[in-house]
Image (tube, rainbow, N blue to C red):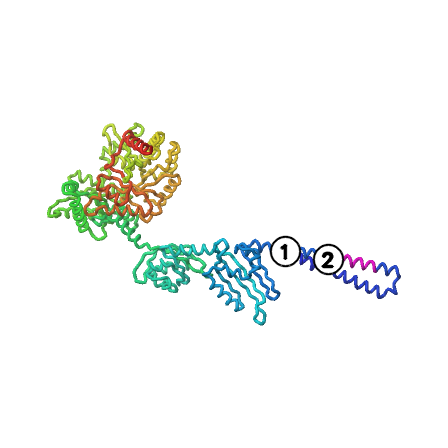
């Protein structure tokens, strides 16, 4: 087209002078003929010859340029025809005045028939219309009589049986008498877009979620499932209604604020919707601005999360409340204590760590049900001994913590005496009298510690002093108390040399698939054999290592030793056994922890996917730092497990964002399975939550068949515990692993 325009411009600009020249020569030639009497014969001939030559030359130039212009027009016409031929469209032009019909070859591609067939039968385009759409053609022909453009969408059947969707735009031209003199129809094959549209529409209608389009808070569209959730029998009951009737004022203002003021492009929000039956439903909404029917609107996708919210509330309650006594639990206590010591209004506080004397004996002789009743009564007496605003929590077992703020030393002594006085009277359980007395250790903030763990630890140490002093009394923590613990000092000094003296070793507790009975992994556990004290319990030396930061080099040794052992097993053909390693919070939060463990894996040529790092929930207190490290470890291929799940400090609101693979149900919860009152309700809740969040769930501390059967019924397929095996030295665990490998080979052969 541009070349055609350029040629036209050349013609207009250059041909004018040649036409003028030609005309001028003709005029001059005529003048010479008129005045030839006055001219010499030779001059007359020369002038005639000159003007004739100029005229002929001008005429030839004009003819040449006209020929070039005609060629340009022909080329442009050819190109335009080529464009029509290659476009996914067809043109039908009928000139009724002269009786000519023009059909582009696009009809062949769309209809699967030759243009010759259409020239022979001009009604062929109607005859191949799908029988269900014949009525549309009748309506189309009637609409064309209004002398306006008509666009129709219908189906045709091609000779090969294919059904294609056609968009047909008809443009009629009428004369002054209302007679059609020309008709142009433009055909488009819209099969793919129509099928995509139908497919999308089907997906929308089949979705169990609410999918709606809203404009100016008026509902323009809602799918069938969404209308059912809101309580309507069909979508038409809701279309045209405003969303004010469904949302609370607070939720409406929240959404309006985000879209109207903050200009949100994508909004995710949880709201409550009132159904047409006035029932309240929790819904998670995703809102996004779109164009709908040419106007600005908002696409709303909503999911009913009512049951999930109930489960979250239950799990949160289980996570922060002790189910037996209804007191705050350890997690809640730690959060509360952390908040109070960082509150400007709190200048000082006291932590009272309370442990019941002889409770274990009562629990063992009278059973756990009696012990639970005693713990409930103890909780009631503690609450009645304190004032409003005082905080009391159950840490677990028969341990309780009381937090008292901005009180002087005399007030603390008075309250401690009052607590002791409350237990001078017997407890009546199942028609029996029980005398239970408390031993209380007291630490002070800030003199005895500036964080919650230190304060509780020191109060715990003071409590043991109270027990050593005859029980049923209270003792205040002092630094002299720590200095008097000679065993702890000896262990600390010896622990510093334990690696060099080869006193540390690893044992391995097998982890089983409780459905198949096969070992799928082992948990590496640290042991220490002291030359004087013999085997020292990890419960004793691990806290010392944590406190002195020795846990970092010890933890590195554990990783290295486990990596070396895993390499040996791999060489011997045991490539499918997962190795789990416990990682301490201090070691985990080392700046280069991810690089250290990655280097070990590379040094020993290990598959990181077969390495599982177990961290406790307390590790996640600094959630931002922890997330950064966790993502590094995941990028390196390591599996992440949360150990002792349910006993730590992590917020469940963060759990869904953590890149973890496995949660381990703590032994105390597994023990609860055989409890006649709770019957493993907490274990079931944790298993359900884990599966809903796509975590693997493994139960630890399985000790009997009743626990195992409960776990099977509730779809927990992974477990470990003394029911299967205690932690074993390397030689013994290898016997089990090789025996299993040999059995597997025998079955395959």
The part of the image, by quadrant, that contains residue 222 is bottom left
Please tell me whether residue 206 is drawn above or below residue 441 in the rendered image.
below
**Where residue 63 is drawn, which disc sits there?**
2
The residue under the point 31% across, 46% down is 691
Dot 1 falls on a residue whose secondary structure is: helix
Residue under numbered circle 1: 76
Which of these two is toward me, 356 or 628?
628
The image quarter in which residue 707 lies:
top left
Viewed as shown, does residue 434 lie left or right of 326?
Answer: left
SS majority, magenta = helix
Q: Residue at x 52, y 57 (%)?
A: 188
Q: Quadrant of the N terminus?
A: bottom right
* Residue 60 on the magenta segment: yes
- The magenta region covers 48-63
Q: Nearer the viewer, residue 144 or 500?
A: 144
User: In front: 134, or 504?
Assistant: 134
- Above or below residue 558? Residue 175 is below
Residue 680, given in percent of the width and then of the height, sits at: 23, 46
Q: How dense is the environment of label 1, judged by Cα within 10 Å: few (below 14), some, or many (20 and up)?
A: some
- Looking at the image, tell me whether mark 1 or mark 2 is earlier in sequence order: 2
Across and down, in percent, residue 176 comes to 58, 71
Q: Quadrant of the C terminus?
A: top left
* Residue at 32 percent of width and 63 percent of height: 276
Whether the residues at callouts 1 and 2 have beta carbons within 8 Å, the answer is no
Q: Secondary structure at mark 2?
A: helix
Magenta highlight on residue 511: no
Can residue 249 be seen in this snapshot?
no
Percent x, y for residue 272?
Answer: 33, 58
The residue closer to the viewer here, 99 or 576, is 99
Residue 154 % position (x, y):
48, 60
Give the CA separation, mark 1 to mark 2: 20 Å
Quadrant assignment, res 122: bottom right
């Amino acid at each position: 087209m541009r070349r055609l325009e350029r040629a036209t411009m050349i013609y207009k600009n250059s041909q004018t002078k040649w036409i003028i020249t030609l005309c001028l020569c003709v005029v001059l030639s005529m003048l010479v003929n008129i005045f030839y009497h006055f001219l010499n014969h030779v001059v007359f001939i020369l002038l005639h010859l000159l003007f004739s030559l100029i005229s002929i030359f001008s005429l030839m130039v004009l003819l040449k340029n006209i020929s070039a212009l005609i060629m340009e027009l022909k080329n442009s016409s050819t190109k335009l025809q080529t464009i029509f031929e290659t476009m996914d469209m067809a043109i039908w032009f009928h000139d009724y005045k002269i009786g000519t019909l023009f059909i582009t070859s696009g009809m062949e591609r769309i209809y699967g028939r030759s243009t010759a067939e259409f020239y022979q039968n001009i009604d062929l385009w109607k005859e191949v219309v799908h029988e269900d759409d014949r009525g549309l053609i009748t309506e189309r022909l009637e609409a064309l009589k209004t002398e306006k453009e008509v666009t129709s969408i219908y189906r045709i059947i091609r000779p090969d049986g294919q059904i294609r969707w056609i968009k047909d735009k008809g443009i009629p031209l009428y004369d002054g008498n209302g007679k059609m003199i020309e008709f142009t129809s433009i055909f488009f094959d819209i099969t793919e877009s129509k099928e995509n549209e139908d497919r999308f529409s089907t997906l929308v209608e089949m979705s169990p979620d609410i999918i709606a389009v809203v404009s100016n808070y008026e509902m323009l569209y809602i799918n069938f499932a969404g209308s059912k959730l809101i309580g309507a029998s069909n979508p038409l009951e809701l279309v045209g209604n405003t969303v004010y009737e469904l949302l609370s004022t607070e939720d409406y203002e929240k959404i309006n604020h985000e879209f109207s003021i903050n200009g949100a492009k994508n909004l995710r929000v949880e709201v409550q919707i009132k159904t047409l039956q006035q029932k309240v439903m929790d819904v998670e909404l995703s809102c996004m601005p779109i164009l709908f029917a040419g106007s600005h609107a908002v696409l709303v996708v909503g999911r009913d999360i009512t049951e999930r919210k109930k489960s979250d509330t239950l799990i949160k309650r289980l996570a922060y409340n002790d189910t037996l006594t209804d007191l705050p639990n350890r997690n809640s206590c730690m959060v509360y204590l952390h908040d109070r010591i960082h509150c400007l209004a709190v200048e000082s506080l006291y932590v009272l760590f309370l442990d019941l004397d002889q409770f274990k004996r009562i629990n063992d002789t009278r059973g756990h049900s009696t012990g639970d009743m005693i713990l409930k009564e103890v909780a009631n007496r503690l609450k009645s001994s304190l004032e409003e605003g005082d905080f009391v929590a159950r840490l677990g077992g028969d341990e309780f913590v009381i937090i008292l703020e901005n009180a002087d030393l005399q007030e603390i002594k008075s309250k401690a005496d009052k607590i002791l006085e409350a237990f001078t009277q017997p407890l009546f359980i199942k028609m029996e009298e029980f005398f239970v007395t408390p031993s209380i250790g007291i630490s002070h903030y800030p003199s005895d510690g500036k964080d919650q763990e230190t304060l509780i630890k020191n109060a715990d140490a003071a409590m043991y002093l109270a027990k050593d002093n005859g029980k049923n009394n209270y003792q205040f923590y002092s630094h002299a108390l720590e200095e008097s613990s000679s065993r702890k000092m000896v262990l600390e000094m010896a622990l510093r040399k334990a690696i060099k003296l080869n006193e540390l070793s690893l044992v391995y507790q097998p982890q089983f698939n409780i459905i198949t009975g096969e070992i799928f992994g082992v948990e590496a556990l640290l042991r220490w054999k002291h030359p004087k004290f013999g085997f020292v319990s990890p419960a004793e030396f691990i806290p010392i290592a944590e406190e002195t930061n020795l846990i970092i080099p010890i933890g590195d040794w554990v990783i290295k030793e486990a990596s070396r052992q895993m390499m040996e097993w791999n060489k011997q053909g045991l490539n499918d056994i997962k190795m789990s390693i416990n990682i301490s919070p201090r070691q985990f939060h080392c700046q280069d922890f991810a690089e250290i463990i990655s280097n070990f894996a590379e040094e020993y040529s290990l598959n990181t996917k077969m390495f599982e790092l177990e961290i406790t929930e307390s590790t996640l207190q600094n959630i931002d730092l922890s997330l950064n490290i966790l993502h590094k470890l995941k990028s390196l291929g390591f599996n992440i497990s949360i150990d002792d799940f349910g006993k730590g400090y992590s917020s469940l609101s963060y759990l869904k964002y953590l890149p973890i693979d496995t949660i381990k149900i703590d032994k105390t919860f597994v023990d609860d399975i055989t409890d006649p009152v709770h019957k493993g309700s907490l274990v079931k809740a944790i298993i359900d939550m884990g599966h809903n969040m796509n975590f693997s769930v493994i139960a630890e501390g399985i000790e009997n068949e009743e626990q195992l059967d409960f776990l099977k019924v509730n779809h927990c397929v992974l477990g470990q515990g003394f029911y299967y095996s205690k932690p074993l030295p390397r030689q013994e665990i290898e016997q089990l692993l090789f025996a299993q490998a040999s059995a597997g080979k025998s079955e395959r052969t």
